[in-house]
Amino acid sequence: MNTADRLVFRILSLQVRLYHDFVRVKESTDSEALHDLRIDVRRLRSVLRPLRASSEIASLDQAAAAVANLTTRARDLEVLIAELKRHGQARQAITRQAALHALYSRVKRSSVIPTLLTALDDCPEAVRAVENERGSHRLKIRIQRAVCKQLKRLEHAIETPGFDRHRLRSTLKRVRYLIEAFPSISPISREAVQAMAATQTALGKWHDLDLWCQLSFKEDDLQRLRHDWSQRTEAALDNAEVHLRSLAHRLPKTKVSRVAVRGLPAAHTADNPFEGVIDVETGLPV
């Protein structure tokens, strides 16, 4: 199976997952449905990122971005309500439940998600068009370049003093999902991927707490939680910084990235930690 075949298979797999996620959202089957939808949209955008020079792929990426924008407010409020319930703040949670239902109704009624799902039907043909124009080998090199470019951005973000941690979190997500989409051409180790996941989780906890602290200055009934959130925010950021330092030691040097960009296999730059591993999502060797 060549690079284009793997790419098409992964996109179709994500399309199936997105259909399932959307049904769960529409039927309100569980509290994680919207979260899973947003994760799969981000994974899709990571898969599409190396091919956005194609107008068809760029349009599909815009459709996926529209889904992310549509669902952001609902997810943020969903997480806040869960936090309020954990703290026994039933009144504050209840007063926000109606707003959450309204946002969910907006998501369900919107044509944005069905538009994305329909557009995905034509994606395999668009990928084949890129393959026919460039060739499978050039397609692989394009993906390698995208991986290395994002790794360099992450390295820069971590090493730059005062770099906004919200932006760094977004960069980390982009890099992680891109690498997980194409593990066989990733120049980093399995341990580095695991460190990325742990760092993303730590930054995510800090991100939520920081947003809640800011919100407590705007919404009077949240003021009583501000002190607790503020203390937890500081602790969460300290923990995230520890993870970031650990991750920085596991990222490849720039020299490794340059070799990978030239199209050499990962084994030419470092031991390939994914050799012989089966992708649990697709059932295929990575």
Image (cartoon, grey):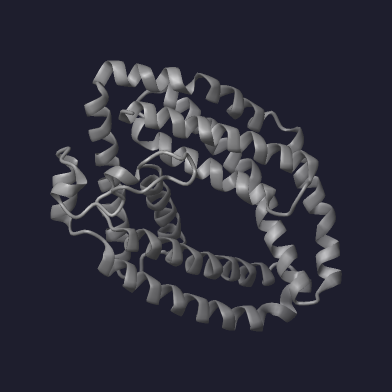
- Residue at point 80% right, 76% down? 88
User: 235 left or right of 228?
Assistant: left
Does residue 78 appear in the picture of this structure? yes
- Residue at point 66% right, 41% down? 21
Tell me the quadrant of the picture where the N terminus can be found: top left
Residue found at the far front of this picture = 276
Across and down, in percent, residue 19 comes to 64, 34
User: 245 left or right of 235?
Assistant: left
Across and down, in percent, residue 217 comes to 67, 72
- Residue at point 50% right, 44% down? 42
Does residue 220 appear in the picture of this structure? no
Determine whether 117 is above or below 184 in the image: above
The residue closer to the viewer here, 274 or 69, is 274
- Residue at point 53% right, 38% down? 65
The number of numbered badges drawn on the structure is 0
Tell me the quadrant of the picture where the C terminus can be found: top left
Across and down, in percent, residue 93 comes to 81, 66
Determine whether 65 is above or below 118 in the image: below
Across and down, in percent, residue 146 comes to 29, 41
Determine whether 58 is above or below 244 in the image: above
| Residue 76 placement: quadrant | bottom right
